[in-house]
Amino acid sequence: MALACTAAFAQDYPSGKPISIVVPFSAGGPTDRVARDLAEALRKPLGGVSVVIDNVPGAGSSIGAAKVARANPDGYTLLLNHIGMSTVPTLVRNLPFKVESDFEYLGIINDVPMTLIAKPSMQANTYAELTTWIAANKGKINLGNAGVGSASHLCGLLYQTAMKTEMTPVPYKGTAPAITDLIGGQIDLLCDQTTNTSPQIESKKVKAYAVTTPKRLTTPLLKDLPTLQEAGLKDFQVTIWHGLYAPKGTPPAVLKKLNDAVKVALKDPDFIKKQEGLGAVVATDGRIEPAGHKKFVADEIAKWSPIIKAAGVYAD
Ligand code: MLT
């Protein structure tokens, strides 16, 4: 009887109520941008159902992720998280969920480069001039981030280590509020994803100096920015990725419908155009399959864990 009910439920899914995607950072930031574009691209393959965004920021994405881990596993509450999914197991010592076993994996969505940007009043116009400014202002530099364990925080930590310069971290609940303060000159520097920085760079509201990928980007707006490796920081490389998750125990037939819809969304020309315009690369490889996604996150946990332990930062 229970089995028959589950089968009937899965057959009708989705119907009757909207699907909510939890974004564990503030509205208007890079994770939110990807989630909103994805929500739009998922609507059609999911039969026209409405897909809404629920911003639940805090603690390096772990508050929003915990909400989804505890949610009813009926396919109506999902999580869109970034690299935070692989950093919180090390950063949060009493994490109230297990990344490996409390979620179903629905596919990696994209890879996103980061940019090093500064307040508009920064006098440096090139990366070389910025390094001179950093050397002259040691001990006085404010570096924004989206909270401990966020992508901007990790990038900032790696950058300070590479530059052998300590900067004062200024945490926000996402890089949307951080970028507002950068534009206002309350903070000096920010390392953030191109999905958030591109519009600000284009409208010249912030100054951009370098990208964090090993190769220069091809996006017309960003193609002239040097890589940090080119600028002398050997081995410097940070790329952020986003994945979609459901609570553990979601019926397999519902998971299949969701993963199929993700694969359609990732081929949607509108979604691809929007993402590429913001410097992101939409996923096409084995990570769009649940097993590939799960293995990739496990590999990323293994990669970030020693870096975070060496930095000695914790979000709890
Ligand atoms: C981050 O630094 O982790 C992101 O920019 C988070 C966000 O605001 O979406």
Image (tube, rainbow, N blue to C red):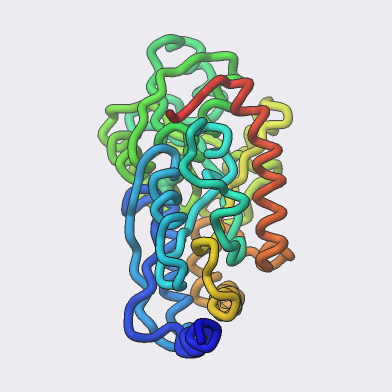
What residue lies at 50% left-to-right and 49% top-to-bottom? 194
Is residue 97 or residue 281 the one in the foreground? 97
96 lies left or right of 112 = left
Is residue 151 or residue 10 the one in the foreground? 10
Decide: is 231 above or below 262.
above
Is residue 6 visible in the rendered image? The answer is yes
| x and y percentages locating residue 20 in the rendered image | 37, 68
Decide: is 307 above or below 210.
above
| x and y percentages locating residue 143 in the rendered image | 41, 26
Is residue 57 or residue 265 the one in the foreground? 57
| x and y percentages locating residue 303 in the rendered image | 70, 37
| x and y percentages locating residue 12 in the rendered image | 45, 89
What residue lies at 46% left-to-right and 85% top-to-bottom? 9
Q: Quadrant of ligand 1?
A: top left
What residue lies at 65% left-to-right and 41% top-to-bottom? 301
Say how many tags the image has. Answer: 0
Decide: is 233 above or below 74.
above
114 lies left or right of 183 = right
What residue lies at 33% left-to-right and 43% top-to-bottom? 205
| Residue with the most extreme front position | 1
Is residue 196 visible in the rendered image? The answer is no
303 lies left or right of 171 = right
What is the quadrant of residue 62 in the picture? top left
What is the quadrant of residue 140 in the picture? top left
Decide: is 163 above or below 102.
above
- Quadrant containing the C terminus is top left
